[in-house]
Image (tube, helix red, strand yellow):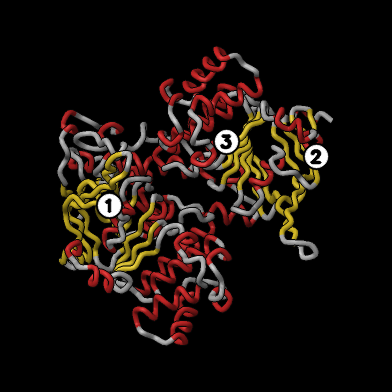
């Protein structure tokens, strides 16, 4: 049986800016399954970070909700008071922010920052907090925790800062861990180390994870479920095998093809024509329509959510038809390993 | 002295950076005596992780930083001996596309100003000439005439990088350094810019030095690869050979670490 820890329902919102309202979320429907790693992928500006920030209600001041709900264990947290939110953040949900060098406080040492998080949630003594900090730094594979604990953010390399950021978000294990671009900007060999470390850590803690990334390769390495966002909507959502191999949305398919062609480095280059829409002036109907190779007259109407199988959902008029044609990854899987089920 | 017709020839290039104050200066060896050549119309990939010295190598060749020692010959001319007042003259034939188009394009200049600045500077064109050339360049990089009036803030990431490429090819250079030309772009448009670079090279016959940690990009764009590690070139060879049969441990590790859909396939089949 699957239980959703967090559910988004028809969540909408925009940023008020001088240049006009920027519609970042345009009806997000998504369930984050308990105990699983859910990937949230999308290009720059697709709304993945904003969507995740609504869970901890840490949106910038100029953000306005237009409707919808974000439920944590069935309770709409958009109605909660600030006090209730305060005890929820960090205890039930914690965020490992993107760009850790900027997210870490430059004037406190790693130890002070880790210790403060732990003491706030547990009321432990400084000594206990320090011991815990050393333990968790070791867990995220910092080679010399005793040394690192006394360092400041600017003294850390990119990979180390990312490890410290992750340590900070799990020193008091939350029910939901949000990892925002944990491998972006790191060298490939460091990325690989972080991915392996995260995989073990998540298994060990048994917590629910929401992984935000623009890199489908990272999703492929870490996630059980994946949601693909485009212009503030979830285009496709489901278990990773369904989304990758029985793809039911043209955007997902094109994104997978581009990734394969660009990252693989062999064969013809493939990319999606055009660019993502301007969030200040979104097209009518399906937002992907202007770039979609499969577009038809029906696409002028906003598509509804189509359920393919129990948890596999696609926002496309032709989802049922698309799913019968093999997904991009399916084509490439050789027959001997293509049959194994996950 | 003519280096068998090589367009660019680098011999024993060394760059030291010094940090701190005397007598406690610390010397970092960023580039440690490297040699390589780039032929006319050739595309050479320079790969390695951050800190391996690949960007410093390019900056030394372009004299954006002064090399500590070594010989750099470009198009029959000793770049390293060029008086600093005349270095600028080299940029007519040698150009660079920078990593981050957001910070390498002046936000207060229109696309027209950005693209025509090198023509005015190096080619002494009349207004009619540079206007015509600017329109030609827009077509070449897949943008429209109407983009010339825009400012970089009004363009998407992919469009900005096209402008960066347009600026670099404006003076008909013989050699273009591409420093991570696609790493700031989303995957759906990355292929577009890569295809543009391939097409332009075919059309204009320039040489490329492609600096990247993205091995997929290097594989698509380069005929030859140089792998840098700690300021040294640890492996070199034709691209397919290096990718298919890497010799150096570092190259092997680099190739194995690339996050790609292979990770998913491994997980599914394993």
Mark drawn on residue B97: 3
Residue A35 in picture, x, y percent from top left: 28, 68
What residue lies at 41% left-to-right and 42% top-to-bottom?
B187
Return the chain for callout 3: B
Residue B157 in picture, x, y percent from top left: 44, 38
Q: Residue A287 falls in which quadrant of the image?
A: top left
Dot 1 falls on a residue whose secondary structure is strand
User: In the figure, is residue B195 to the left or right of A37?
Assistant: right
Marks 2/3 same chain: yes
Mark drawn on residue A63: 1
Residue positioned most to the front: A18
Q: Is residue B243 above or below residue B135?
A: below
Dot 2 falls on a residue whose secondary structure is strand
Q: Is residue B261 above or below residue A57?
A: above
User: Do residues under tags 2 and 1 come within 8 Å of each other at their CB atoms?
Assistant: no
Q: CA distance from mark 2 to mark 3?
A: 23 Å
Dot 3 falls on a residue whose secondary structure is strand
Residue ID for mark 2: B71
Q: Nearer the viewer, residue B244 or A192?
A: A192
Q: CA distance from mark 2 to mark 1?
A: 56 Å
Q: Residues within 10 Å of mark 3 (few under 14, many from 20)?
A: many
Q: CA distance from mark 3 to mark 1?
A: 36 Å
Depth-wise, is mark 2 or mark 1 nearer the camera? Answer: 1
């Amino acid at each position: 049986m699957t239980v959703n820890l967090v559910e988004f329902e028809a969540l909408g919102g925009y940023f008020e800016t001088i240049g006009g309202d920027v519609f970042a979320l345009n009806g997000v429907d998504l369930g984050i399954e308990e105990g699983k790693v859910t990937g949230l992928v999308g290009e720059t500006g697709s709304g993945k970070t904003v969507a995740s920030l609504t869970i901890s209600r840490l949106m910038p001041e100029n953000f306005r909700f237009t409707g919808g709900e974000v439920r944590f264990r069935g309770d709409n947290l958009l109605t909660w008071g600030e006090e209730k939110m305060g005890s929820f953040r960090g205890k039930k949900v914690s965020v490992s922010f993107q760009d850790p060098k900027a997210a870490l406080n430059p004037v406190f040492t790693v130890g002070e920052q880790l210790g403060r998080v732990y003491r706030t949630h547990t009321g432990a003594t400084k000594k206990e907090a320090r011991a815990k900090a050393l333990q968790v730094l070791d867990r995220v594979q910092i080679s010399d925790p005793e040394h690192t604990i006394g360092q400041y953010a600017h003294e850390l390399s990119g990979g180390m800062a990312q490890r410290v950021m992750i340590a900070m978000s799990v020193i008091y294990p939350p029910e939901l861990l949000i990892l925002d671009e944990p491998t972006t900007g790191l060298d490939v060999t460091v990325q690989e180390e972080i991915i392996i470390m995260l995989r073990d850590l998540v298994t060990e803690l048994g917590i629910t994870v929401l992984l935000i990334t623009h890199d489908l390769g990272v999703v492929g390495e870490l996630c059980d479920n994946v949601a693909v966002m485009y212009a503030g909507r979830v285009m496709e959502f489901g278990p990773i095998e369904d989304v990758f191999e029985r793809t039911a949305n043209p955007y997902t398919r094109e994104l997978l093809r581009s990734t394969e062609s660009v990252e693989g480095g062999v064969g013809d280059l493939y990319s999606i024509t055009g660019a993502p829409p301007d969030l200040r002036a979104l097209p009518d109907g399906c937002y992907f329509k202007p770039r979609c190779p499969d577009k038809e007259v029906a696409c002028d109407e906003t598509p509804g959510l189509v359920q393919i199988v129990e948890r596999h959902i696609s926002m496309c008029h032709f989802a049922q038809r698309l799913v019968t044609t093999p997904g991009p990854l399916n084509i490439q899987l050789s027959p001997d390993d293509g049959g194994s089920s996950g | 002295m003519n280096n068998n017709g090589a367009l660019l020839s680098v011999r024993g290039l060394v760059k030291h950076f010094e940090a701190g104050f005397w007598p406690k200066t610390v010397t970092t060896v960023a580039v440690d005596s490297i040699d390589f050549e780039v032929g006319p119309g050739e595309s050479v990939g320079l790969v390695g992780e951050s800190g391996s010295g690949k960007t410093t190598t390019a900056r030394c060749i372009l004299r954006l930083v002064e090399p500590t020692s070594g010989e750099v010959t470009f198009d029959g001319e000793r770049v390293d001996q060029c008086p600093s007042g005349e270095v600028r003259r080299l940029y007519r034939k040698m150009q660079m596309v920078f990593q981050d188009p957001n910070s390498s394009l002046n936000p207060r200049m229109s696309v027209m100003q950005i693209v025509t600045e090198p023509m005015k500077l190096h080619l002494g064109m009349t207004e009619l000439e540079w206007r015509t050339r600017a329109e030609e360049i827009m077509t070449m990089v897949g943008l429209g005439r109407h983009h010339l009036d825009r400012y970089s803030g009004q363009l998407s990431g992919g469009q900005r990088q096209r402008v960066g490429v347009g600026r670099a090819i404006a003076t008909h250079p013989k050699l273009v350094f591409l420093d991570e030309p696609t790493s700031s772009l989303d995957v759906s448009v990355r292929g577009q810019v890569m295809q543009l670079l391939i097409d332009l090279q075919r059309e204009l016959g320039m040489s490329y030095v492609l600096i990247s940690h993205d091995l997929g990009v290097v594989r698509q764009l380069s005929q030859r690869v140089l792998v840098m590690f700690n300021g040294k070139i640890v492996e070199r060879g034709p691209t397919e050979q290096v990718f298919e049969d890497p010799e150096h441990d570092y190259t092997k590790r680099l190739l194995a670490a690339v996050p790609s859909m292979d990770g998913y396939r491994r997980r599914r089949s394993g």
